[in-house]
């Protein structure tokens, strides 16, 4: 899961970055509305956490431009001005949720989980594929109810594949979904992560299929 935080209060942003990264998300930050608008136009994110009072472009304008491009990415608005009028305007412009500052990080994390579930079209924190399941809250994976020991990067890779079961995911798409700005991850490194994950999950009737030159797909092995 990849999240963009658009927040110019660096102290608050640092807290959000630490909290969300500790739960396994790849998180990037911008400090102005124009940077947020450009980032959302150029990259694929699973969630935008958007402060309204951004310099250079107001958060409402960022949101308006995002929806005008046809993007359905979930948006969580943060604001210090918690008025009914602002909440109504934000929701009418296409925001999915709203939090007034100050807020508890624990509540924000729960709202992030709810919004990313909604973005995937599911009401559960558990993603399943045959005997394989992934708990997005606890960041653990199971095969036939037996926990698999996976690294943070392997868990994130598995999550991406589970979210796209039945569809090919290219190496470039994996880099885009797993890596933050400035993080150098080569296609060879992706192959290494796939190899390690494959060894750990193929003890059960699930495998990662490779379509040379196109990408990877999670599929069940026929009995």
Image (spheres, rainbow, N blue to C red):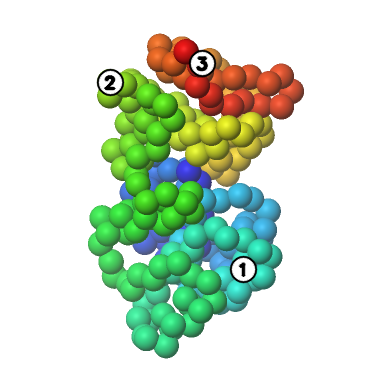
Q: Residue furthest front?
A: 223
Check if mark 3's residue and mark 2's residue have beta carbons within 8 Å: no
Check if mark 2's residue and mark 1's residue have beta carbons within 8 Å: no
Q: Nearer the viewer, residue 191 or 147?
A: 147
Measure the alpha-carbon separation of dots 3 and 2: 21 Å
Front label number (2 vs 1): 2
Q: Which residue is mark 1?
A: 67
Up the image or down, 115 lies above or below 96; here it is above
The crowding category of the residue bearing disc 1, from other C-alpha atoms within 10 Å (few below 14, some 14 to 19, many at least 20), is some
Front label number (3 vs 1): 3
Which quadrant of the view contains residue 202?
Answer: top left
Measure the alpha-carbon separation of dots 2 and 1: 42 Å
**Quick one: label 3 or label 1, which is nearer the N terminus?**
1
Up the image or down, 144 lies above or below 32; here it is above
x 34%, y 44%: residue: 125
The crowding category of the residue bearing disc 3, from other C-alpha atoms within 10 Å (few below 14, some 14 to 19, many at least 20), is few
x 44%, y 30%: residue: 129
**Quick one: label 2 or label 1, which is nearer the N terminus?**
1
Measure the alpha-carbon separation of dots 3 and 1: 42 Å
Q: Can residue 87 be seen in the rendering of this structure?
A: yes
Q: SS at mark 3? A: loop
Up the image or down, 220 lies above or below 72; here it is above
**Quick one: label 3 or label 2, which is nearer the N terminus?**
2
x 33%, y 25%: residue: 142
Where residue 100 appears, as percent x and y from the top left, is 33, 73
Q: SS at mark 2? A: strand
Q: Which residue is mark 2?
A: 146
Q: SS at mark 1? A: helix
Front label number (3 vs 2): 3
Query: Which disc, if any, is residue 222?
Result: 3
Which quadrant of the view contains residue 37?
Answer: bottom right
Q: Can residue 116 be seen in the rendering of this structure?
A: no
């Amino acid at each position: 899961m990849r999240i963009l935080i658009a927040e110019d209060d660096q102290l608050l942003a640092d807290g959000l970055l630490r909290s969300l990264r500790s739960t396994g998300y790849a998180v990037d930050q911008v400090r102005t509305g124009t940077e947020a608008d450009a980032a959302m136009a150029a990259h694929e994110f699973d969630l935008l956490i958007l402060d309204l009072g951004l310099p250079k472009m107001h958060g409402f304008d960022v949101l308006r431009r995002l929806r005008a491009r046809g993007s359905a990415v979930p948006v969580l608005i943060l604001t210090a001005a918690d008025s009914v009028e602002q909440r109504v305007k934000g929701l009418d412009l296409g925001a999915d949720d709203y939090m007034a500052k100050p807020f508890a990080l624990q509540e924000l994390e729960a709202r992030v989980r709810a919004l990313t579930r909604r973005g995937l079209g599911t009401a559960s924190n558990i993603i399943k594929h045959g005997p394989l399941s992934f708990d997005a809250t606890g960041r653990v994976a199971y095969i036939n109810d037996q926990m698999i020991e996976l690294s943070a990067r392997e868990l994130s890779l598995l999550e991406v594949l589970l979210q796209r079961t039945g569809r090919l995911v290219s190496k470039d798409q994996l880099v885009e979904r797993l890596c933050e700005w400035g993080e150098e991850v080569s296609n060879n490194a992706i192959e290494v992560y796939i190899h390690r994950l494959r060894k750990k999950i193929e003890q059960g009737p699930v495998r990662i299929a490779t379509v040379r030159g196109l990408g990877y797909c999670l599929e069940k092995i026929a009995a």
